[in-house]
Image (cartoon, rainbow, N blue to C red):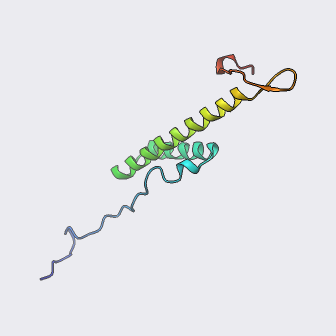
């Protein structure tokens, strides 16, 4: 026996495309690329209009991108602290805090 698949039946497929995992490729992104994508995702979330599943996936991706950016910034800060030039031209460690930086 076959089931009917007319309008209004449960056999119709959803129109939303499958969503890829939120952290796909995030760990391979450079800071500038991750930050630019984070800005795009946030803008899309602010614009709204997506399905619940799409919105959740975008939010998860935004969190993964934010964490990637934070991790890369922390690594860069550590490198700067460890490789500050001394007055005699040699390299040495110097703790750098944003509020003490000279602009």
**Image spot of residue 93 (x, y percent):** 73, 24
Q: Position of residue 34 (x, y in %)?
A: 58, 45
**Picture mark count:** 0
Q: Residue furthest bottom?
A: 1
Above or below 6: residue 52 = above
- Report the side of 78 relative to 47 (left or right): right
Q: Residue at x 29, y 68 (%)?
A: 13
**Residue 10 percent coordinates (x, y):** 20, 67
Would you say 42 lies left or right of 36 here? left
What residue is shown at x 62% (from left), y 42% (from top)? 31
Placement of 52 over or under 87, stated as above or below: below
| Residue 102 figure quarter | top right
State left or right for residue 75 relative to residue 15: right
Quarter of the view holding residue 99 = top right
At a point 26% along the width and 69% down the height, the residue shown is 12
Q: Is 18 on the left or on the right of 12, as rendered?
A: right
In which quadrant is the C terminus drawn?
Answer: top right
- Closest to the observer: 39 or 32? 32
Q: Is residue 88 above or below residue 42?
A: above
Query: Is residue 34 at all visible to an observer of this figure?
Result: yes
- Looking at this view, name the residue that lies furthest to the left: 1
Q: Quadrant of the N terminus?
A: bottom left
**Which residue is painted at 57% across and 39% down in the image?**
69
């Amino acid at each position: 026996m076959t089931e009917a698949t007319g309008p209004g039946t449960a056999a119709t497929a959803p129109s939303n495309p499958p969503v890829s995992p939120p952290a796909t490729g995030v760990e391979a992104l450079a800071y500038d690329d991750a930050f630019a994508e984070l800005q795009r995702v946030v803008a899309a979330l602010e614009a709204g209009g997506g399905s619940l599943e799409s919105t959740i996936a975008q939010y998860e991706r935004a969190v993964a991108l934010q964490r990637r950016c934070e991790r890369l910034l922390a690594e860069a800060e550590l490198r700067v602290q460890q490789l500050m030039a001394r007055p005699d031209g040699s390299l040495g460690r110097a703790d750098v805090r944003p509020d003490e930086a000279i602009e």
